[in-house]
Amino acid sequence: RPADFASQFPAQVTVAATWDRDLIYDRAVALDAEFKGKGIHVMLGPVTGGPLGRSPLGGRNWEGFSAEPLSSINSYLSVKGTQDQGVATFHETYLLSFAEAVRAGSGSIMYSYNRVNGTHSCQDDFTLNKILKGELDFQGYVMSDWYAQWTDEASALGGMDMSMPGTDSWDSALVSLVKNGSVPSARIDDMVHRILTPYYALGQDNDYPAADHYKVIRTIGEDSATLLKNVRTNGGGLPLKKSKFLAVSGQDAGANPNGLWYCGVFNQCPTGNLYTVNPEGTDNPNPHYESWPRFCTSAKESVPKVRILGSFAPYIVTTLEGIQARAKADATQVNWMLNDLDLDTANLDATVADTSIVFTYAYQVEGLDRDNITSWSNGDDLANTVAAQCNDTIVVIHSGQQVLMESWIDNPDITAAVFAYYPGRETGNAIANVLYGEVNPSGKLPFTIGKSLSDYPSNGTATGNSSYPHVVFEEGNLIDYRWFDANDITPCFEFGFGLWLVEYLASCTMHVFIYFFSYTTFSYSGLKVKSTPGKPTDGVQLTNEPFDGNATLYDVAYTVTATTKNTGSLSGCEVAQLYLSYPTSQTKQPLRSLRGFDKLCLNKGQTKTATFKLRQKDCAVWNVVRQTWTIPKGEFTVHVGSSSRALPLNTTFTV
């Protein structure tokens, strides 16, 4: 920071919505190239520990890959791309992504500000030494988040190797601790080795050319777009047809009226096209504080003054610009209204429009959680106001987390809805290509969208003014779709959902039958499970995770295959998803857990085989008594389909 003229990449949750291993890897490669091109040798990413989205109110959920612990695959691919270029709940849900990041050869890991079971993260011997450096055999260094170090001696002995951003905590104090014998000199040697080893091992002492990565950014924006609703019964919906008049409503469609430099993370002014929030490493604003901010425990405490030095991409293609460029080819007149509160103008534009596109958004940012999960800035009213005058209204949502849609999703005059996440600087080109059918949307939701906030666990975030907020993870492994399944809650849109069915009788209220259409259709058949014991096909580094099986924890155990056919009239991509149910003896396990996915792109009429490799760890649970991974005896059920609740194929195998 600052780093002007760097690309504005899509957020992690956006690339997660592509469910595309190649794109996840390519994004990491591109990020790595730009970091090195700027002379930056440590990228503070990917965010491997989540946030997993145990609460939809979490302000930083969009920084993680998914609400599903299998986001560990995304962590593995991101680390690999960069480098190339309760106790049971702790192991089974929250540690998975870290394990995959270590296996991919991560050079450094950052701890955060929170405490773990009452101990500050910077000095937690159990998580840093015993688990990370012991059980996972992590060979790199542990750095603090900015100003997150609390102690000198305890953090040195607890496993921290680097204090950031170079504070005074360890200067003379660390020397004194070594001299008086409190910290062994061997521990200092260990810190040095851990810090320097990845520097040379990853070739960070060599130059790297600059690059422009607009193509991969645009592709992620296109492939992440998730089609939630598409009604073609009245000739409307998507893809857009050639028309005379098109209306675009919502401030999220246009540029910030004060220019690129006006807004940044810390002054929180989400005005204009919300293509990202807290930019991915390359484009962060640079804060200069009179004093570092901290949690206020009294209304009398002063708030530090801030001035912002911008770090921005050279350009941003807004959604309005993307639509205008495409509409020009059709000689379509585009009218726009960029004030969410100006319902009169929105109403007037919609009256004459053949099709209206409403852009809504929700803003999430580092430093605070959300109070609700509704759209910002009058978005729901804007959508319904426009739909009252135009019976072909399309809603596009820019958000990194769930937003409620109950008030408008079943409106018969809203013919389509697209969840676009935070797609980066090519947002306008990407969404225009999706709306006009230049690309077939293939994104799938990386989280569950409920009908109300009460659908989610109630203890998700700490509230009140406590200096030491405390949250008990009472739900255990049951986060997101697992919670909905366990409590038999019908969501608005389930985890892994993205339209492809020709006729899908569903709606948020489940009492109005709406016919949803995708751009093409797919069918599933021929599910097979075969025992195929074999060594891991991935991974750079081994771990020391305990396992009582005859093989190693990451060995392949089974190969699952299923046939996927494009039964529609257009080419398209489908994400086949595998979910696993454990033997009935495992009463604390979720009803189903995602254990694999395979994105297949097929021409019309083409058939391909979706292949999933189930590892020993995918079938294992954490034995709290014996403190080891173990595979329970009994019957496992394999489910394959297009989402967590659309699983037409089922079979079993017995251990």
Image (cartoon, rainbow, N blue to C red):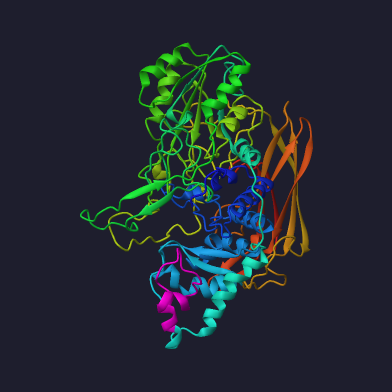
Q: Is residue 134 visible?
A: no
As for residue 174 lying within the magenta part, the answer is yes
Tell me where residue 281 appears, x and y as whole percent: 53, 51
Quarter of the image holding residue 83? bottom right
Q: Residue furthest bottom?
A: 180
Tell whether 647 sits left or right of 13: right
Tell me where residue 188 appears, x and y as whole percent: 52, 79
- Position of 110 relative to 639 (above/below): below
- Position of 228 relative to 7 (above/below): above
Q: Is residue 384 visible?
A: yes
Tell whether 576 sits left or right of 366: right
As for residue 654 lying within the magenta part, the answer is no
- Position of 111 relative to 604 (above/below): below
Rendered-image quadrant of the C terminus: bottom right
Tell me where residue 266 appears, x and y as whole percent: 39, 47
- In the image, 219 versus 595, the foreground residue is 219
Q: Residue furthest left?
A: 300
The residue that appears at 56% across and 11% down in the rendered structure is 244
Which segment is the magenta one?
154-177
The mark tally for this picture is: 0
Tell me where residue 273 appears, x and y as whole percent: 47, 33
Tell whether 327 sits left or right of 362: right
The residue that appears at 45% across and 20% down in the rendered structure is 387
- In the image, 649 versus 444, the foreground residue is 444
Quarter of the image holding residue 8? top right
